[in-house]
Image (tube, rainbow, N blue to C red):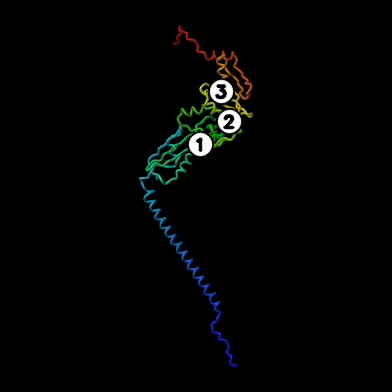
Amino acid sequence: MFASTPSPFKVSGDSQAIGLGVERRQRRRAFLRRTLRWTTSLLSIGLVWWMFQGGLQWFLQTFVWSNQALALKRFQVKSHGVIPQQLLIQWTGLKPGDNLLAFHLSEIKRNLELSPFVMEATVERLFPETLRIHVQERQPVARVRLLKPDVRHGGSIGLLPLLMDAEGVVMPMPEEGEIPRSLTLKWQQLPEIVNVSEVSFQVGQSVDHPVFRAAVQWVSAFQASVLSEKIQIETVHVTQLDQLEVHTGDGQRILFALSRFDEQLAKWHQVMDYGLRIGRRLAFLDLTIKNNVPIEWFSEDGLQAEEHQHRIPPIDLNHVDV
C-alpha cells in the first residue's frame, strides 16, 4: 500500500538513447559548419575572381587596346601573282589604326584564303606597328565557257568564262580593271576545255569529274613540255570515251589517252620533227594506241595553196601608187 508510482517528471535512465541524440546533433552541427565554410570560400573566390577580371579588363583597356604604340600602321604584302596589294589588304578586314593585338591571325588567314585565287596565305605580326602578309596565288592553266542566263541583259543566254588551275580548282575571270589588261588577254588565250555540259563547276572548289581533271593535267604537262613553244592549243575536248581530243591552232587533231602524258607528248614531238624533215604537215595523230600510231598528213595541194595564200606578192618597181 505504500508502493509509489513512477513520477512523470523523472528523467529516463537509458544512457544509450541519450548518446544517440547527442551524436546526431554533433553530426548536424559539423555538416552545417562545413557547408558554411565551403560557401564562404566559394563566395570569397568568386569575389576575388570578379575583382581580378575587372582589374584585368581595366589594364587591357588602358594599356593594351588603347595603346597607340600598338596601332597598325603598315602592311607588308608579298604576293607571287597578280592580285593588287590594296585588294589583299581589303580582304583582311583590317584598316590602319586597328590594334595589332585585337585580332586572331587565323581569322585573317581564313579571310584571305576565301578568295579562289589564293592557294595559301601566311600572316605575321611585326611589332610594334606592322602586319606581314604573304600570299601564294593559283596560276590558271586552262579555261572553260559555260552557257548561263545574263541577268543584266534581260535574261539572255551568255557565256560565263571560268579559269582552272593545275589542281582543277575553279576561278572566276577577273572583272575589267582588276588585273593588268595584258594578263587578261593572256588568260583569254589559254587552252579551252570544251564538251563540259555534264561537268559540275563551283567557284573555289576542285572539279571531281575524272576526264575533266585529266584534261587539266594534260594542259599542265603540255605547258611544261618543249611543244608549248611550237604549238598553240585551241581546244581540249572532253569526250565520252577514255581519251582527249586536242585541236591546235594550225589545224592538227591529236587523240590522247588519259595517262602517260609525257610519253605521248614526246611521241607527238617526234612525229612533228619527222614531218619537218620530209616536208609534210601533220593533220591527225592517234596516240591512244601503244603499238600502232595512226597518222594523217595534210595533202600537198593544200600545203601549196596555203603557201600561196601566205606568200608575199613581189613588188613592181615600175609601178608607183599615187
Dot 2 or dot 3: first in sequence order is 2
Amino acid identity at mark 1: Pro
In the foreground, 202 or 207? 207
Amino acid identity at mark 2: Ala
Whole-percent x, y for residue 245 in the image: 60, 25
Whether residue 163 is visible, yes or no, is: no
State the SS at label 3. Answer: helix
CB under 8 Å between callouts 2 and 1?
no
List the residue tagged with mark 3.
Answer: 266
Rate crowding at label 3 as few (under 14), some (14 to 19) or many (20 or more) other CA atoms within 10 Å. Answer: some
Residue plotted at (54% across, 27% down): 221
Dot 3 or dot 1: first in sequence order is 1
Q: Nearer the viewer, mark 2 or mark 3?
A: 3
Rate crowding at label 2 as few (under 14), some (14 to 19) or many (20 or more) other CA atoms within 10 Å. Answer: many
Whole-percent x, y for residue 168 in the image: 55, 33
State the SS at label 1. Answer: loop
Dot 2 or dot 1: first in sequence order is 1
Q: Extreme front residue here?
A: 15
In the image, taking residue 42 as reference, residue 260 lies left or right, namely: right
List the residue tagged with mark 2.
Answer: 214
Whole-percent x, y for residue 71 in the image: 37, 44
- Is 91 above or below relative to 253? below
Residue plotted at (41% across, 42% down): 125
Whole-percent x, y for residue 165 in the image: 52, 32
In the image, taking residue 257 as reference, residue 95 lies left or right, namely: left
Rate crowding at label 1 as few (under 14), some (14 to 19) or many (20 or more) other CA atoms within 10 Å. Answer: some
Q: Extreme left residue here?
A: 69
List the residue tagged with mark 1.
Answer: 116
